[in-house]
């Protein structure tokens, strides 16, 4: 995929590309890079500061927050064509929290340097508006995660999580670890393992070394209100 | 305060007022109203839909979410000069959750009809950008609330909550109910009452019929990391 030039990806990723001047387009191309990340690699941490605006070309990223005690809460996942503005939070007025981003599979990510994003935002109101719109998109994701964790019961959350994973998985086996599921539903690994065992006894899933196979989709769906 | 005309309030509330055409300004004035709400009154509920963009002139509003089981989680509070765009979520692409808004004291709120906000947003990019910026402001508030609830211990959250209330209260007595405190920290009323009793035994607060008096500010502050 890397044989295409950067402007090709930028044009496809930035919906207001045609509202940018030739100079502005050039600046963004100059300050972009197509980075490849390995499965499990950390793209953005609490200390990495304001690295840049990201557009996922291929792969899957997990965006989460981390407590001082090391507890992780998944906010949302990013797939191909999704954008991440929070990795460049310094370009956004009013955003004062930091997220952590890991690659969950090998991923290609288009990254635009935050200083240049910030400059173009100051000069081009369409680009500024576009970046803020992308930010509000994630606001809904975060509210959804929050409502899941605070309002839904553990079995419901886990069922919803497995259901979601099955939609993003071509295989019938979901290879996610119990640890990751726990982070996604804001619970502990032991609780997830116990609940999965219960699901298995109910004939909803089958657990194996390879992962989790959903054996009764209808029953799983019924657990989700 | 109501003797001033609406354009006075709009000019003060909308920072990009000068970027609007005379026609656009006129449309916004025409579709605005200065509403007075009594303490305890509901301004916006799950069924009220997309009523409009609000600017608080005086008073205090509480913005929260509600589960199907009736559990409330406070997202943030709005004071004089604060704006609320989520009560007009239909004008925002990508926002698909609803919040509930109550007046906690008698409040005056400038409300602009959402259909007109939407029209002006479509025509004026500066206004559109401004509305999205206001939205991201609340994104940080919600992340803060989420981190409080998911990462902090109950005593720390309650201490932070009392500390915050004391900053917004000229009186030394905080008149908030245990029920409201529970909603603010995402816990149950009984838990709050027990913890307040513990705080009283530690000499941090004094409980009375009138409310909660902070007797040792330094100790209270020390509970908050």
Image (cartoon, coloured by chain):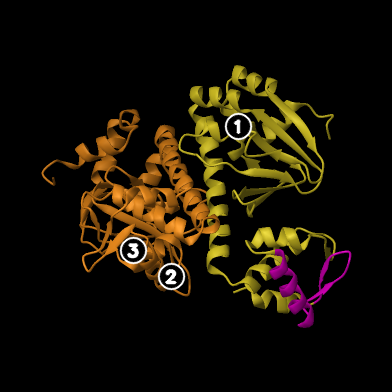
Chain colours: A yellow, B orange
| Residue most extreme to the left | B3
Q: Callout 3: 10 Å neighbours few (<14), some, many (20+)?
A: some
Residue at horizontal 36%, vertical 45%? Answer: B117
Chain letter for the residue marked with disc 1 in the picture:
A
Q: Give the image location of residue A186, x and y in percent.
A: 62, 61
* Labels 3, 2: front one: 3
* Residue lying farthest to the top in this orientation: A23
Q: Is residue B26 above or below residue A217?
A: above
> CA–CA distance between discs 3 and 1?
44 Å
x then y, percent, for residue B17: 31, 32
B27 inside magenta stretch: no
Give the secondary structure at mark 2.
Answer: helix
| Res A145 label | none
User: Is B130 in front, or is B21?
Assistant: B130
Q: Is residue B112 visible?
A: no
Tell me if I can see residue B215 in this picture: yes
Circles 3 and 1: CB atoms closer than 8 Å: no
Chain letter of mark 3 equals B
In the picture of the structure, the residue carrying the numbered disc 3 is B200
The residue positioned 66% from the left and 59% from the top of the image is A184
Helix or strand or loop: what does disc 3 sit on? helix
| Image: magenta residue range | A189-215
Q: Which chain contains the residue that carries disc 2?
A: B
Image coordinates for residue B71, horizontal then vertical, percent:
45, 70
Residue to which mark 1 is pinned? A50
3D distance between C-alphas at marks 3 and 2: 14 Å
**Which image quarter: residue A127?**
top right
Q: Which mark is residue B191?
A: 2
Circle nearer the N terminus (3, 2): 2
Side of A216 relative to A47 (left or right): right
Estimate the spatial distance between the alpha carbons at disc 1 and disc 2, rounded to whole Å: 39 Å
**Which one is in front, A110 or B17?**
A110
């Amino acid at each position: 995929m890397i044989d295409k030039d950067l402007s090709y990806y930028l044009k496809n990723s930035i919906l207001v590309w045609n509202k940018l001047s030739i100079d502005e387009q050039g600046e963004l191309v100059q300050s972009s890079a197509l980075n490849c990340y390995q499965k499990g690699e950390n793209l953005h941490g609490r200390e990495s500061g304001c690295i840049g605006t990201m557009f996922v070309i291929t792969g899957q990223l997990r965006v989460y927050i981390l407590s001082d005690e090391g507890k992780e809460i998944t906010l949302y996942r990013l797939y191909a064509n999704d954008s991440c503005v929070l990795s460049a939070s310094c370009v956004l007025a009013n955003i004062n929290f930091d997220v952590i981003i890991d690659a969950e599979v090998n991923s290609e990510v288009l990254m635009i340097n935050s200083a240049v994003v910030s400059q173009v935002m100051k000069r081009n109101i369409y680009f500024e508006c576009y970046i803020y719109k992308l930010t509000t998109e994630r606001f809904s994701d975060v509210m959804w995660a929050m409502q899941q964790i605070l309002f839904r019961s553990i079995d419901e959350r886990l069922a919803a999580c497995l259901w979601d994973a099955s939609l993003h998985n071509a295989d019938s086996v979901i290879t996610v670890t119990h640890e990751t599921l726990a982070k996604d539903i804001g619970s502990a690994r032991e609780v997830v393992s116990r609940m999965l065992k219960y699901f298995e006894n109910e004939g909803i899933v089958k657990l194996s070394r390879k992962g989790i196979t959903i054996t009764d989709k209808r029953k799983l769906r019924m657990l989700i209100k």
